[in-house]
Image (cartoon, coloured by chain):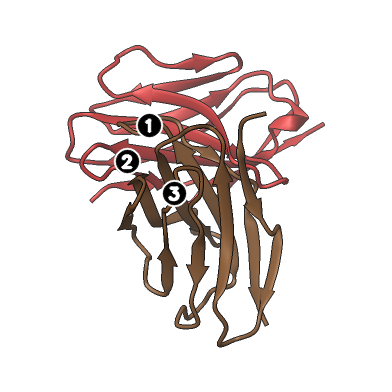
Chain colours: A red, B brown
Amino acid sequence: AQTVTQSQPEMSVQEAETVTLSCTYDTSESNYYLFWYKQPPSRQMILVIRQEAYKQQNATENRFSVNFQKAAKSFSLKISDSQLGDTAMYFCASYTGTASKLTFGTGTRLQVTL
Amino acid sequence: DGGITQSPKYLFRKEGQNVTLSCEQNLNHDAMYWYRQDPGQGLRLIYYSQIVNDFQKGDIAEGYSVSREKKESFPLTVTSTQKNPTAFYLCASSIAGGGREQFFGPGTRLTVL
């Protein structure tokens, strides 16, 4: 069974600073995908970034980048130049073909302050 | 605009009643999903469907039922046997096949009175 663990229930960062959200996962599959989703106060889930496990290069999307450590089963999200609009719940998730479904972590609530 | 719609946004139900949540997508996606979100528990999969007229149970299917008669529609019925139905329900869709992005609807907040 897949599991995804987010050990930081809440984090805070000042505007323009950098913050890293942690995520670890467990799977026996060799082919899988990892995701970070953002859920702002509107509760609309939005994809932030996606990583294919067979790719060694870390995915990046503008101010968002990941540190994918396959051997350690770690998938952290780095947000650079934090903005007030980054305030949200952030969910880490994994997908394997065998399960054919996303498994979510419990989320990290990020507050960006002035 | 392409997207996923869920209705209603807020739903109130008396104990002992069944209620159906609507989910419609015009993204031409084959796969559709229903999740339940509770505080501190992330999203949990209720049911999913990879193709019309076929669906599978997720991790917490007890007390719920679905149908997939049309590609664009995947309604969820919360039955009276669901013990703790008060929650936020999210519908999603994706292209079939491994590891594709799931697009989410705006959600329905169900409250049992």
Q: Residue furthest bottom?
A: B16
Q: Chain of mark 1?
A: A
Q: Label 1 crowding class (10 Å Cα cut-off): few <14, some 14-19, many 20+?
A: many
Q: Tag 1: residue type?
A: Leu
CA gap, disc 1 and disc 3: 18 Å
Depth order, front residue of A86/A112: A86
Element carrying mark 1:
strand
Quadrant of residue A32 within the rendered picture: top left
- Residue that label 3 marks: B33
Judge if badges 1 and 3 mark residues of a common chain.
Answer: no
Mark 1 vs mark 3, foreground winner is 3
- Residue that label 1 marks: A34
Quadrant of residue A11 within the rendered picture: top right
A17 above or below B81?
A: above
Q: Are marks 1 and 2 in contact (CB under 8 Å)?
A: yes
Mark 3 vs mark 2, foreground winner is 3
Q: Label 3 crowding class (10 Å Cα cut-off): few <14, some 14-19, many 20+?
A: many
CA gap, disc 1 and disc 2: 9 Å
Q: Chain of mark 2?
A: A
CA gap, disc 3 and disc 2: 22 Å
Asked whether, in this view, residue A5 is left or right of residue A81, the answer is left
Q: Position of residue B76 (x, y in %)?
A: 50, 62
* N-terminal label among 1 and 2: 2
Residue shown at 57%/47% (left/top)? B24
Q: Residue furthest front?
A: B69
In the rendered image, the quadrant that contains the N terminus of chain B is top right
Judge if badges 1 and 2 mark residues of a common chain.
Answer: yes
- Residue that label 2 marks: A25
